[in-house]
């Protein structure tokens, strides 16, 4: 399976301070076992640059994943960016599985599932499945 992990750029001021990059530890923790299991896994760390939505989507389409996993380091400000990127990827690849996890979806999963029908699965911060869409 082709799996793409995306760490979106966050508009919060803390992520724009030099040497204050928050590595996508949750995505990396998931990615390693997926690689060990034989999946073709790639990471887009869009915090560097930061990358535009168009650049993220173009890179994702070049990989043409079966699943895209989104997560971010706990900031509410990252959610609108994830929603925009996920919507764009789902529109371009209708059968892609969009999976979202982390701190924000742990507390807002009902709203996300109600407002974003392209999200297929949600995971809490401790990798507990919240509910399939």
Image (cartoon, grey):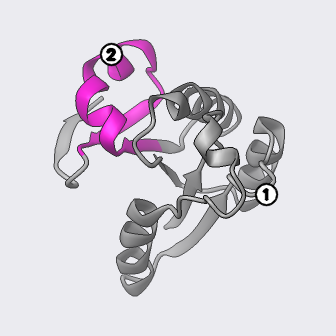
Q: Indicate the position of residue 102 as horizontal and vertical percent values.
A: 34, 45
In the image, residue 98 lies at what x, y percent? 47, 41
Q: Is residue 99 magenta?
A: yes
Residue 57 drawn at (x, y percent): 75, 43
Which label sits in the foreground, 1 or 2?
2
Residue at left offset 78%, top offset 54%: 59
The image quadrant of residue 43 is bottom right
Q: Which corner quadrant of the image does residue 37 belong to?
A: bottom left
Location of residue 115 with respect to 118 vertically, above or below? above
26 on left or right of 130? right
Mark 2, residues whose alpha carbon is within 10 Å: few (<14), some, or many (≥20)?
A: few
Q: Which contiguous range is marked in magenta? A: 98-124
**Of the image marks 1 and 2, the number of the one nearer the N terminus:** 1
Residue for point 49% across, 67% down: 1
Q: Report which quarter residue 38 is drawn in.
A: bottom left
For disc 2, the marked residue is: 111
Q: Secondary structure at mark 2?
A: helix
Q: Is residue 19 magenta?
A: no
Element class at badge 1: helix
Q: Which mark is residue 62?
A: 1
Towards the viewer: 2 or 108 = 108
Q: Are marks 1 and 2 in contact (CB under 8 Å)?
A: no
Q: Residue at x 71, y 52 (%)?
A: 60
Q: Residue 10: in sight, yes or no?
A: no
Instruction: Please state the horizontal and vertical placement of residue 108, each as a whole percent of the image.
Output: 29, 24
Q: Give how far apart the Cα atoms at labels 1 and 2 are.
A: 30 Å
Residue 53 shows in the view: yes
Q: Which quadrant of the figure contains the C terminus?
A: top left
């Amino acid at each position: 399976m082709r799996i793409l992990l995306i760490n979106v750029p966050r508009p919060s001021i803390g992520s724009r301070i030099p040497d204050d990059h928050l590595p996508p530890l949750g995505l990396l923790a998931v990615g390693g076992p997926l690689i060990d299991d034989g999946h073709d896994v790639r990471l887009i760390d869009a915090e560097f640059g930061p990358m535009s939505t168009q650049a993220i989507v173009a890179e994702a389409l070049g990989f043409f994943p079966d699943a895209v996993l989104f997560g971010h380091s706990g900031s509410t400000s990252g959610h609108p960016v994830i929603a925009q990127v996920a919507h764009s990827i789902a529109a371009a690849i209708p059968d892609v599985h969009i999976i979202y996890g982390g701190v924000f979806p742990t507390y807002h999963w009902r709203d996300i599932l109600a407002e974003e029908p392209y999200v297929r699965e949600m995971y809490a911060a401790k990798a507990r499945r919240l509910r399939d869409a």
